[in-house]
Amino acid sequence: MDPAKIDAAIDAAIDAAIDALAAEGWCVLEGLLSDEATAALARECAALHASGDLMEARIGREKVASTLRGDRTRWFDMNAPTAAQQPYVDALETLRVAFNRSLMLGLVESEAHYAVYPPGARYARHLDQPRQLEARVVSAVYYLNADWHLEDGGALRLYLDDGSHHDVVPHAGRMVLFLSARFEHEVLPATRERMSIACWMRRREPGSVF
Ligand SMILES: O=C(O)CCC(=O)C(=O)O
Ligand SMILES: [Fe+2]
């Protein structure tokens, strides 16, 4: 496809995502990045994992590794992204600006980390906005797993307002977005290694002088 058509397709997908976020508080967005850009992120994440550069994840400001989550993570430096991260950081910025314009969310910045869940690892049901992280407004998780099948497990289970749930299969190129304060969710165990980028778009810290 020529680049102008790709841009128009992404713009339409972002508009649809905004409508769904406004109506339901969550949505799934496909096609944010090219397959090649997604594959480059997957390669970088796998290489960091292989070289031991991912750390056991923590919850909030907890000092010890948690039994509630089994992933290993590494934060992006949003001011100095790697070549692989640059298109993703640019896309997050496009989303942040679009959400502010259409939904008036007052988002001032995004934070993001790679996450690798080894086979069998999970993240127990939780909310992304514990008290010490109340600046998080929108959660966005981008998946990096090529050839992922339903039977591989590892879905993100989103608990909806009506008591039902929706499972998002972590296919490469798929992003799930939801309001951080509203939806509890959990990562179900997978039979394969599961890679993603977890991101939060934040409003100004309450009490911040800036
Ligand atoms: O990887 C996912 O699908 C969700 C991860 C998550 O809930 C988190 O990092 O807070
Ligand atoms: Fe979460």
Image (cartoon, helix red, strand yellow):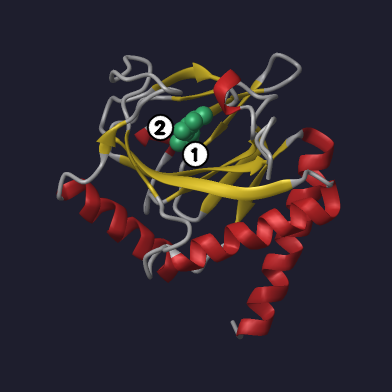
Tell me the SS state at disc 2. Answer: loop
Q: Is residue 80 visible?
A: yes
- The numbered mark, 1 or 2, whose residue comes first in the sequence reads 2
- Residue 108 screen position, x and y as percent: 67, 49
Residue bearing mark 1: 169
Which three-letter amino acid code belongs to the residue tagged 2? Answer: Gly
Q: Amino acid at mark 1?
A: Val
What residue is shown with label 2? 154
At 32% from the left and 14% from the top, the residue drawn is 67
**Residue at (64, 75) in percent of width and height:** 6
- The Cα atoms of the two marked residues, 1 and 2, are separated by 7 Å
Would you say the residues marked 1 and 2 are in contact, meaning their CB atoms lie under 8 Å apart? yes
Quarter occupied by residue 157: top right
Q: Nearer the viewer, residue 120 or 21?
A: 21
> How many badges with numbers are in the image?
2
Residue 31 visible in the displayed image: no
In this orientation, which residue lies closer to the viewer: 145 or 137? 137
Quarter of the image for the C terminus: give it. Answer: top right
Say if 18 sits above or below 73 in the image.
below
- Is the CB of the residue bearing disc 2 within 8 angstroms of ligand 1? yes
Q: Relative to 66, is 3 on the left or the right?
A: right
Residue at 71 percent across and 47 percent down: it is 107
Dividing the picture into quadrants, the one containing residue 136 is top right
Mark 1 CB lies closer than 8 A to ligand 1: no
